[in-house]
């Protein structure tokens, strides 16, 4: 297998941390991004940079110049980017109406717009070489919009929408787009849950006030009983990189608890999607 240049976002913890090391262990050149590598993430950046085949880049996903500088740095060093893994993400739970427009924008900036901007930056190089892979880490919550995770689910729906359409647009040009859908895992992101800023409406939801706590309790029980291993998500990314071009599935579910439900929904889409393409004269893109 040829060695690839791989850009991975959100590598300071969780899936990104494990994915960077797993991909580098195969001999690929990994550029691992995180924020504030000289400040709060200094220790993590130093530890990751000591791993063979990994270079750590200081990148703010909400800063256009920072994103472009990262891509320019990688191109200057290696001439191309073969794989982009949009892993970084933020969460928001709680009563949906409590989210302000600013709250929603903040979630979408990281979960939707940053991946899109990076895709726009790397695609010219991938198309030029008629070879490339973009892996977008979504969620089972990108298939079903759950109560009390509405904003987070909406952002993952957005990422899934970008990915699904691009999957069919780009594969005839030699570029694969793939989605990884993790379920509930004990990662640092799950411990940094954001909530809506508008607390003035919370009292109006007293009739269902206990339901968010029920949801968090159920998530905790899943983690305690199933003990899902975040390394499984990193392994899924590695598997997609290893698969031959054109043979990578659009969606890969990594969820030992509710994954069968998500997979059945995906299977239904796989059956019906070619019919929609055919209805609009695009049946050749389904081949």
Image (tube, rainbow, N blue to C red):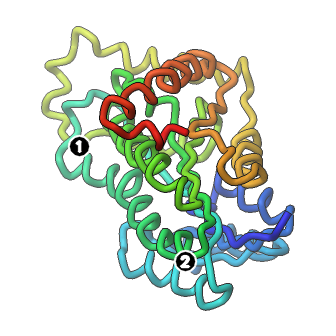
Describe residue 107's horizontal placement relative to residue 41 as left or right. Answer: left
Q: Secondary structure at mark 1?
A: loop
Instruction: Rate crowding at label 1 as few (under 14), some (14 to 19) or many (20 or more) other CA atoms within 10 Å.
Output: few
Q: Give 228 or 160, whichever is nearer the viewer.
A: 160
Which residue corresponds to the image point at 35% horizontal and 43% vertical from the top-left?
A: 158
| Percent of width and height locating residue 173 | 53, 61
Report the residue marked by disc 2.
58
| Percent of width and height locating residue 233 | 69, 42
Above or below residue 243? Residue 147 is above
Q: Give 218 or 123, whichever is nearer the viewer.
A: 123
Instruction: Rate crowding at label 2 as few (under 14), some (14 to 19) or many (20 or more) other CA atoms within 10 Å.
Output: some
Which residue corresponds to the image point at 72% horizontal and 43% vertical from the top-left?
A: 236
| Quadrant of the rendering where the N terminus is positioned | bottom right
Describe residue 130's horizontal placement relative to residue 55 as left or right. Answer: left
Which quarter of the picture shows residue 48? Answer: bottom right
Q: CA distance from mark 2 to mark 1?
A: 29 Å
Which residue corresponds to the image point at 52% horizontal and 26% vertical from the top-left?
A: 270
| Quadrant of the rendering where the C terminus is positioned | top right
| Percent of width and height locating residue 191 | 54, 41
Nearer to us: label 2 or label 1? 2
Which residue corresponds to the image point at 32% horizontal and 51% vertical from the top-left?
A: 108
Residue that lies at the very extreme toward the top in this rendered image: 207
Q: Earlier in the sequence, mark 2 or mark 1?
A: 2
Report the residue marked by disc 1.
197
């Amino acid at each position: 297998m040829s060695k690839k240049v791989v850009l991975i976002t959100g590598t300071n913890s969780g899936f990104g941390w494990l994915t960077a090391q797993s991909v580098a262990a195969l001999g690929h050149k990994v550029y691992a991004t995180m924020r504030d590598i000289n400040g709060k993430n200094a220790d993590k950046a130093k530890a990751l940079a000591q791993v063979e085949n990994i270079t750590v880049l200081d990148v703010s996903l909400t800063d256009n110049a920072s994103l472009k500088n990262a891509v320019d740095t990688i191109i200057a060093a290696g001439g191309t980017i073969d794989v982009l893994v949009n892993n970084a993400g933020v969460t928001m739970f709680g009563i949906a109406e409590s989210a302000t427009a600013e709250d929603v924008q903040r979630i979408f900036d990281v979960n939707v717009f940053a991946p899109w901007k990076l895709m726009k930056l790397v695609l010219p190089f991938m198309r030029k070489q008629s070879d490339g892979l973009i892996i977008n880490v979504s969620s089972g919550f990108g298939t079903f919009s759950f109560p009390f995770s509405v904003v987070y689910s909406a952002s993952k729906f957005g990422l899934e929408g970008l990915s699904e359409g691009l999957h069919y647009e780009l594969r005839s040009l030699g570029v694969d787009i793939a989605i990884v859908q993790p379920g509930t895992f004990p990662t640092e992101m799950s411990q940094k849950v954001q909530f809506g800023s508008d607390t003035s409406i919370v009292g109006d939801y007293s009739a269902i006030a206990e339901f968010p706590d029920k949801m968090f309790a159920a998530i905790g029980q899943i983690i305690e009983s199933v003990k899902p291993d975040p390394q499984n998500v990193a392994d899924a990314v590695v598997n997609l990189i290893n698969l031959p071009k054109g043979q990578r599935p659009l969606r890969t579910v990594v969820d030992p608890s509710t994954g069968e439900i998500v997979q059945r929904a995906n299977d239904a889409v796989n059956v019906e999607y070619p019919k929609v393409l055919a209805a609009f004269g695009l049946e050749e893109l389904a081949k």
